[in-house]
Image (spheres, rainbow, N blue to C red):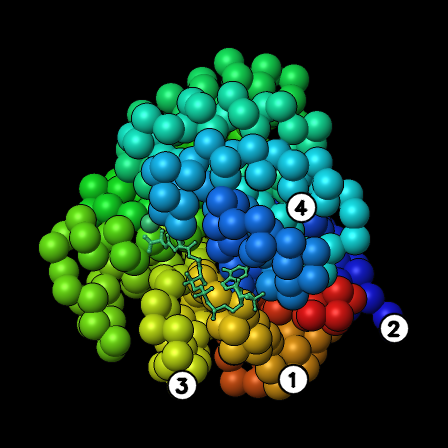
Amino acid sequence: MTSLVGYARRCASQFASVSEKAKYVPRRSLLYVPASSEKMLNKVPLMKSDCVVLELEDGVALTSKAVARSNAVKTLNQLQGSMLSCFELGLRVNSFASGLLEDDLKELSKAEVLPAAFMIPKVDTPEDVATIYDLFRTTFGANRITDSPTRLVIWIESARALLDMPRIVSSVINLHRNSGFFKLDAVVFGSDDFCADIGAIRTAEGLENIYARQRFVTVCKAFQLQAIDSVYIDLKDEEGLRESCLQGHSWGFTGKQAIHPSQVPIIQDSYKPSAERVEWAKSLADAFSMHQQGGTGAFSFRGQMIDRPLLLQAMNVLQMQERIMGGGL
Ligand SMILES: CC(C)(COP(=O)(O)OP(=O)(O)OC[C@H]1O[C@@H](n2cnc3c(N)ncnc32)[C@H](O)[C@@H]1OP(=O)(O)O)[C@@H](O)C(=O)NCCC(=O)NCCSC(=O)C[C@H](O)C(=O)O
Ligand SMILES: [Mg+2]
């Protein structure tokens, strides 16, 4: 099969930022696996969630943090580099404010390999970002955390963080650019902690979070980051989960958190680009290439004005499609 991304990349080769996206990691669903449960951890190799998260934070009781940390190290040593059914095996540590992060990192530094993504909840201020970086540097040593393929995913979970989100995200991006710290790829909206923080009552319709989710997704997209939507906690309500996914997808979210394996197929299916969307993206990339060769930057395509941002959207679709098809997910 001709590579869709290779094709689109050739069309767009004049843009460095387009080719930088080559290592796109789809994260339609992020499935939490509490690392305190060996039974659940044993299922990780066969899990078909785009991203599987070894969970040390709220999915693990305070009394089980030590066992969860040591299970996580074992799992990383056993599984990283082996054939997994997911695209990414990440690990969510405890927040800086919990006072547990330092112990998490000390234990994790014993692992021979780092997770494919470090995931950091409750990042509330740009100052948190600086402190978290210092903790990583002192615990792992600068060498292990500099210019590493490990990605970073952070959670926004409070009113303060939501309002300060552009500065928080900028701080993380600048740490990557200036110090070579892990590259920020995605941001997750921690809806449950957010509701607790603002005193909202969580409802099935989610009206209480509309403003927050729309601001959240806008900021993610302003920084060209993946935007991961809320958890859907009603495990039995498949229809409600599907509606919530379709709404999130249409608002610009790129994926959703999952707490149970049964949620994964519904989420992944809802966030898969449709055949029409793939056809649109491929044709647009084709037209873009033709117009670039003719010296035109903006042009009209199927009644819409097209310029570089639309090409980037098309690239997202093609990269997602290629990874999903290539990965058999
Ligand atoms: C919610 C659960 C506690 C339910 O678990 P359980 O009662 O065991 O469910 P089932 O009997 O239906 O399970 C069937 C089998 O599937 C396995 N299972 C279930 N969940 C998982 C999982 N997440 N990963 C791997 N395997 C799983 C069971 O072991 C059963 O196996 P078997 O007996 O062999 O058939 C549980 O699903 C769970 O703990 N989920 C994760 C909870 C969690 O991590 N929460 C924190 C993250 S959410 C969050 O923090 C959001 C954000 O930060 C915010 O603020 O909004
Ligand atoms: Mg949370």
The N terminus lies in quadrant: bottom right
- Of 125 and 93, the residue lying toward us: 93
The reply to whether callout 3 and callout 4 are in contact (CB within 8 Å) is no
Graded by Cα atoms within 10 Å as few (under 14), some (14 to 19) or many (20 or more), the crowding at tag 4 reads few
Q: Position of residue 175 (x, y in %)?
A: 49, 27
Left or right for 301, reference 46: left
The C terminus lies in quadrant: bottom right
Q: Amino acid at mark 2?
A: Met
Graded by Cα atoms within 10 Å as few (under 14), some (14 to 19) or many (20 or more), the crowding at tag 2 reads few
Q: Amino acid at mark 4?
A: Glu
Q: Position of residue 198 (x, y in %)?
A: 14, 52
Q: Nearer the viewer, mark 3 or mark 4?
A: 3
Q: Which residue is mark 1?
A: 275
Q: Which residue is mark 2?
A: 1
Q: Which residue is mark 4?
A: 20
Graded by Cα atoms within 10 Å as few (under 14), some (14 to 19) or many (20 or more), the crowding at tag 3 reads few
Q: Pick whichever of labels 1 and 2 is earlier in the sequence.
A: 2
The answer to whether any part of residue 267 appears in the image is no
Q: Amino acid at mark 1?
A: Ala
Q: Pick whichever of labels 4 and 2 is earlier in the sequence.
A: 2
- Of 180 and 17, the residue lying toward us: 180
Q: Pick whichever of labels 1 and 3 is earlier in the sequence.
A: 3
Residue visible at 50% across and 26% down in the picture: 105
